[in-house]
Amino acid sequence: MGKPKIGIYGLTGCAGDQLNIINCEDELLKLFDIFEIKSFVMASSAKDEEIELDVAFVEGSVSTEKDLEHLQEIRKKSKILVAIGHCAVYGGVQSMFMGNEEWMERYKRVYGKESAVTLTPPLEPKPLAAYVKVDAVLPGCPIEKEPFLKLAGKLAHGVVPRVPDYPVCAECKWKENECLLLKGEICLGPLTNSGCGAICPSMNIGCIGCWGPIAKENMKSEAMLLMEKGFDMDEVAKRFAIFGGVERAEALKSLVSSSTKESGK
Amino acid sequence: MRVFKLKRENFIPFMKGLSKFGELWGPVRKGDRYVYANEPPEKFVLNAIRTIVPAKKFFLPQKSTILKFKNNEWREHYDVKKRVIFGLHPCDIHALNIYHKFYTRLYPDPYYLKNRENTLIVGLSCLPDENCFCHLTDTETVNEGFDLFLTDLGDKFLVWVGSPKGDESLKLVKDLIEDTTQKDIDEYVEWRKKRRSMFKVSLDLEGMPEILTFNYDSPIWEQMGTACLSCGTCTMVCPSCTCFDVDDEFDIRTDEMNRQRYWYSCVFREYSMVAGGHNFREARSERLKLWYTHKLVGFMSEYGSPACVGCGRCVVSCPVDINVITVAKALLKEKPDAFWARMASSNVEVQHA
Amino acid sequence: MLKANAPKCNIRGNVVVEENPYLPERARIVRKFDLTRDVRFFQVRICDPDKVMTWTTNYKPGQFMMVSLPNAGEAPFSITSTPSRPGLFEFCIRKVGRLTSKLFELKENDYIWLRGPFGNGFPVEMMYGKDLLFVAGGLGAAPLRSVLLYALDYRDRFGKIFYLYGARTPDDMLFREEFFRMKERDDFECYLTVDADPTGLWPFDIGVVTSLFKYVNVDADNTVAIVCGPPVMYKYVVDEFLKIGIPDDHIFMTLERKMKCGIGKCGQCVVEHKYTCVDGPVFTLWDVKNIRTLI
C-alpha cells in the first residue's frame, strides 16, 4: 500500500485544531513520512486540489455558503472524511442556540445590517454531518496531540477509528481522582466523550464538556442532580449548552421547559 | 498461622526492610481520600479507609500493553515490577482472592500471574467507618491471599505470615520482629470486639441472591436506569470488577502496534453491542441489572459466594447513589436515602429563576 | 455444560501458563470467494507447519476463533469447516463493521491472525446414535455446516439426519450450490426454502423455515435438534421442536455475543453468570430457560 494521501482543511472556526496538528513538533516529520500531505493551507503552500484523497481532515463548522461548497468538494474527492475539533463534529460554541428562531436577529445584532458582510451568504452554524457523510470524528476544543496521533495511527492502516462509548468519568477514575460532582461542583464528565485523559478533573476543575456530548447521555439526571446540589436550572442549562452543539440544543429545550413545569407545581 | 509482634517504632524500618523486595506502595492521602502510591513509608496513612481505586490496579492496570506487533509477528509484552503493596484491608484481600479465582480459571491470564508473582502483599487491619459493610459479606477477616498481614494494636502490630513468600520476606526484617505474648493475644481479642461493635450498616445481604432473583422484573431497575449516568465509576472502583476492553494502537513514533487492554464497564453503552449495531442491553436499566445480578447472584452460582466484599467504594463513589446498599434496601422494601430514589419519586426541588 | 480444561499447576499448586492465550497465531488466506452479496468465504491455513494439523484436528464443531488484523481489532467467528477434514480453517464472514471491512480488502496469501479455538462447541459424542435435526436461518448455516459435515463424515455414528435451511432469497443462501448437491444424496434429507424468490427460478419450497417441518420424521426422544439463525427465529423453531416432543436438553442453539477475549475474562459476552465465550456459544433450551436474557 502506498502512503495515504491526506488533506487538512478548515471551515469556520478558530483554526486551533490545525494549529495543534502543527504543534505535534516532534512527530511532524513522522506524520509526513506516513502520509502524503496534499493540502494543508496553514502549514504548506503546496496545494494539489485536483487529486483524490484517502483521508481529509476538516475542522470548523459550516457557517457560510462558501463553507458548504468547500465541504462538498472535499467530500467528493475523499475516501475517508474525518471531522476534527468540536466545531466540525458538533457545531462548536457558535451552534449552541441552534434551532432558535432568532438566529437572524442575533446575526444582525453582531454584524449590523444584513448586508454588512457581503463576501458569502451566512448559514446557521452546523457540524459537517448535517450536510455530508462523516466517516470518523475526533472531538475536542481544540483537539489534543495524543488523541490526534492515535487517530493518525489508525488511519495510517486505513482503519476508520471510532469514538469510545464511555465518558470522561472512566478516564477520571483511571487517574484516581475524587469525583467533583460528589464535592458539589459542576462537572460535565458523565455527559462528555472521553479521550482527553480527564485533564480538567485531574486539576480539580470540573469538566466543561469540550469533547462534546456522549451518545445517549443522561442529561436529565445530571441536571436534577446539580439542582439538588443547589445550582439553578439557568446556570446548569448554560453550562450544558456551551459545548452541547446541535445535538444537545434540542434536548436542552425540552429539559428546561419540563423543569419549569415541575417548579410550577 | 505464624504470628509475630512488631513494635510501632519499628514500623518504618520494617517497611524499609521489606522494600528490598521491590518498590514500596501504600495508602497516601489525595484530597479527602486515599490512593496507593509509590512513596516512602513515612507518608503512609495507617488509618486510611478505602482508597479511591482498589489494589486491582496492580494486577490489571487501568491501561496496559499486552502484545506488540512488528514485522508481521505478535509478541508478548510484560511490564512487570517487583512491588511491595502495603495497606490492603481484609476486604481488599478478599477481592484479590476473587480476582485470583477469576483470572486463573480455565485460561489463566499470564499478565495477572506475572504481576501477582512479583508482588508482596502486606495487609493492614482497619476500623470501619459508616459505609463499611464487610461484616455483612463475611469478609471482615481474612485467612489467605496475603503474604504478610499487620494488625494495628496501637503501640504494636501483630504480623501474620500468610504464605511462603511472606515467610521468606521476613528474613529482610528479622531483627525487627519478636514473638507474641499472652498479653498481645488478649489485646487482639479485645481489639476484635471493639472493631465488631463499630459497624453501622445493618441489612439482610445474605438473602440477596434469592431476593434479586425474585425482583428481576421489579420497577426499581427502571428507576435506577433513569438516574444512572452510565459513567462507569461503580465498576472502576469495585475491587471485584474484572471487565476490560481491548484496542490496538499504532504508535507512529516507533512504528509499533500495541495491543492494549483497559478497564471497561458493563454500564457503558456498547458493552453488549455487536458489530452491525444490535445491542443486547440497550437500556441503562438492563445494564445495571446485569451488574447487580452478576455480582450478587451470578458469582454465587459460580464461586459459592457473592462478589461483593463490603468495601463501600460504590457507596461513596456513585454520584447518583446507585450502590449495593441502596439497591439492597430498595429490594427489601426499605426506602433508601438515595438520589435515584428521590428522582424517581420526583421529590427533587427544581428551581428555575 | 462443557468446560474447557482446568488450568495446569506446578508442584507448589501455583497456576502456570504454558501458552499466552492472548497471543494470535499467523495464518494465510488460501482461498476466498463471495457466498452472497455481503458474506465472504475464507479458507485459511496456519503458517507454522508444525501447528497445522494439531490446530485443525483438535476442535469441536460449533467452536469459534478470534480473528484479528492488527489495528482493525479482533472478533469471534464460528468455524464453518469440520475437524474431520483437517488442514484448513474456514469462515463465513459478513461485512458489518470495522474489522470485517478490512478483512474484505484482503487477497489470497495475505495474513490474518487467529486465536482459539474457543467455546464449548457441540457435544458431538453425546449425539452418537441419535437422529439429528438441523435448522438454519441465514448466516446461521455457518456454524451448522461444521457439525453437519462432521456428521456426514462419520455418517454411520448417527441416526437419521434432517437439514432444514431457510434464507431470505436464493441470493442470500450460503453454500447454495453445495446444498443443491447435498439434496441429491440419499443418506440424509436436506430441505431448502426461501422467504421470497424475486428470480422466479427457485425450484424448492418458498416460505419460512418452520414450514419445512412437515418433512421431518424423527424419533423425538432420541433426537438432537440444533438451531442457529437470527435471534427472531429461535422462538418459532423451538416451538416446532417442542411440538415434535424433543426434550429441552436435546435442543441446542448457538448464540452470538460481543467478545473481546474469547477466554472468559473480558466480560463483554456475559449473560447472568455465564460467559458465552467459555460456557457457550452452544446452549441447550434448558440453559435458555434457566439463564434469563440468553435469547
Image: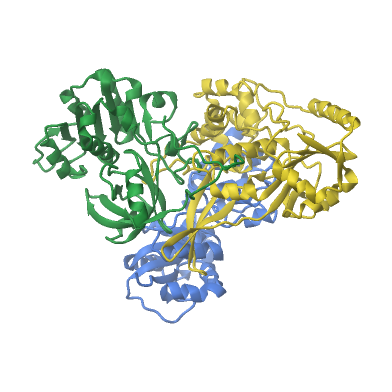
Chain colours: A blue, B yellow, C green
Give the total of numbered labels.
0
Viewport quadrant of the C terminus of chain A = top right
Task: Tell me residue C231's x, y (percent).
Answer: 33, 34
Q: Is residue A236 above or below residue C238?
A: below
Residue C82 as seen in the image, left or right of residue B143: left
Question: Which quadrant holds the N terminus of chain A?
Answer: bottom left
- Residue B292 sits in which quadrant? top right
Toward the viewer: C57 or C79? C57
Residue A77 in which image quadrant: bottom left
Can you say whether B94 is above or below B136 in the image? below
Residue nearer the viewer, B250 or B92: B92
Which residue: 38% across, 69% down?
A70
Position of residue C204 relative to residue A240, above or below, is above
The picture places residue B12, in percent across and down from the top left corner, at 85, 50
Residue furthest out toward the front = C11
Residue A122 visible in the current orientation: no
Seen at 27% across and 52% down, the residue is C43
**In this orientation, which residue lies closer to the viewer: B102 or A217?**
B102
Q: Is residue A217 visible?
A: yes
Position of B314 with respect to C198 (left or right) is right
Q: Residue at x 53, y 27 (%)?
A: B301
Apparent side of residue C5 relative to residue B120 in the rendered image (left or right): left
Residue B318 in the figure: left or right of residue C16: right
x and y, in percent, of residue A113 in the image: 49, 66
Q: Where in the figure is residue B164, as x and y percent of width and height? A: 70, 42
